[in-house]
Image (cartoon, rainbow, N blue to C red):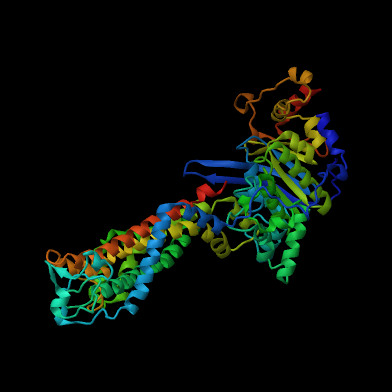
Amino acid sequence: MKDMQNVQHLTEEERRLVGYNADEFVDENFSGHSYVKEIILTLFANKATAISLICLLVIVLFAIFAPMLSPYTYKEINSKTTNMPMRIPVLEDLGIFDGTRKGVDMYAKKGIEDQYHYFGTDNLGRDIWTRVWVGTRISLLIAVLAVVLDVVIGVTYGMVAGFFGGKIDMIMQRLIEILTGIPNLIIMMLLLLAMEPGIPTICLALAITGWVNMSRIVRAQVLKLKSNEYVLASRTLGASPKRILLKHLLPNTMGQIIITFMFSVPHAIFFEAFLAFIGLGVPIPMASLGTLINDGYRSAMLYPYQVLCPAAVLSVLMLSFNLLGDGLRDAIDPQMRSM
Amino acid sequence: MQANDQREVLLKVENLKQYFPISRSYTVKAVDDISFTIHRGEIYGLVGESGSGKSTTGRSIIRLYDPTDGKITFCGQDISGKMPRDTVRMLRTKMHMIFQDPMASLNPREKVMDIIAEGIDIHQMYSSQEERREMVYAILKKVGLSKEHANRYPHQLSGGQRQRVGIARALIMKPDLIIADEAISALDVSIQAQVVNLLKSIQVETGCAILFIAHDLSMVRYISDTIGVLHLGHLVESGTTADVFEHAVHPYTRSLLSAIPRPNPLLEKDRPIMTYDYKTSGLDYSQGTYHDITDTHKVLGTDADVQRWLKELA
């Protein structure tokens, strides 16, 4: 006890750390990596994620530019050139995709040797290459729009329910349960029957129940975060609920939101394809990956490339999104980041 | 180190009760009828074992909880019930808190600059970005960090540095009262000393009062002017540091003091250890009243109890 008291008699000068000047001091123990930079580094360290990111980029670029550069349009019907086989330059010299069927060069037979239909044509003579990329464009557009709607509704709903809690939360959760109690497909089909079929309607049909998942994840995060000490600190400083939600809770939920977003997009793409497959897709002559698969599947036994081409793009697209989502989760995961 | 009663009373807590209803039939009485006052510029140490209601007291005072009963007066204004807008603003600018876990108390997605400036952002206490930056730099210097730290994220700082950021956040508003809720418990011993010295020098420099909540008795003895001992939600003894450490009356306080290890190995070997168990002690805190031993020294107990303890000590 005597020792403790001696310390109290030290003067201010004696207590100061020797050789320490706060202004010039630069602490080099911790590198100044920003948060975003660290995420990107971890993301590319994962090979599967890097590959899926590249695949995704390629698909998006093709979806944007391929229809523009193609000499055909997605709706141009040509009764002369129906069900043409695949013909791709360079590869045709190797003896594959050279436009022959059972040894007969279909292109020479029709007298169009100067034309190339990379993915062949369908039963109305439309170029499948162009239609696949237009379809990818539409599918991506629908999926991203629907998921953005999910995010907007789901994040708002989840944050309000999680933050205010109590009775508000109780009522909001019961509403969700009622909504999820009705089978998804019935809501969608009724909506699509009641409204003009088209991109906005399909987006709405996907979003009308899709946000529930997002809101649940956001609510769980907010419930977890709102009793954190930094939120308490903010409250003791007099912060309004709006400030706490936007400044503290939203940025810390962002990782989860991005991950859920990444997993929702392929889900929405698939659901759109599914709707198209049961005949509730975008109206003809518009194409989406789902309607293309639906069309191609009818003649799958005779002309398998008509279904395989859009199906391959759909598969790669979904796989890429899922792998990217996986990689992002590893990179963003807040549990690993607190040191 | 004598508490000076002539100084203005800053915080007056009277019969504060904080209950948490768990179910219809069961209520946790975290804080049960405690009263104390903190004078301007005083360091008040609140000690007790875990679960004794130390943190709850701090959080009730700063109104993170709504007190069940009792009256809290801060800077002459009642802050225990529903407060008018002016009082809320006064409370939020004049009273601040430093939290236990320096990592959990800093938003991992914000830079140190924005964390520290949060208070002045909320209350619009600057006129330009330039002024805001200067205020943050000044406060960083005061807590012993450099300007360069302002652009860091919390995970790029060490434990002691993080706690300094927490202190800076509380200090930037020039508060009259800082509640340090186990502010040093999560730090290692060498850093504890740094942070405690920092708190002490800040207290001397700015003249703010500190409610220092801790369970480390030697730290509390070192830093506090006045000490309150909490047990099971009751304030069993309070007084100046000398009153409590040299003339402890309550058996709980005496058992706590007997548990402090001595630095001298010869004394340590023969250190008498007092045991105290509320259940077998035959005491009932709710029956007790405050007895003045001296002007500054108060003990909770019934008349008979206090007489008996004083006789034991004599």
> What residue do we see at 76% from left, 51% from top?
B144
Q: Is residue B19 left or right of residue B6?
A: left
Who is closer to the viewer here, B161 or A119? Answer: A119
Locate residue B44, reporting x and y percent.
76, 43
**Quarter in which the C terminus of chain B is drawn:** top right
> What residue do we see at 40% from left, 65% from top?
A57
Who is closer to the viewer here, B218 or B294? Answer: B218
Who is closer to the viewer here, B227 or A185? Answer: A185
Check the image and report above or below for B42 versus A308.
Answer: above
The part of the image, by quadrant, that contains residue B251 is: top right
The part of the image, by quadrant, that contains residue A130 is: bottom left
> What residue do we see at 81% from left, 54% from top?
B206
Name, please, the residue furthest toward the front.
A93
Locate residue A311, reporting x and y percent.
25, 63
Check the image and report above or below for A7 versus B152.
Answer: above
**Quarter in which the N terminus of chain B is drawn:** top right
Q: Is residue A72 left or right of residue B301?
A: left
Tell me, yes or no, if residue A123 can be seen here: no
Locate residue B45, reporting x and y percent.
74, 41
Q: Is residue A238 left or right of residue B143?
A: left
> What residue do we see at 71% from left, 61% from top?
B90
Who is closer to the viewer here, A135 or B220? Answer: A135
Tell me, yes or no, if residue A59 can be seen here: yes
Locate residue B63, reporting x and y percent.
63, 54
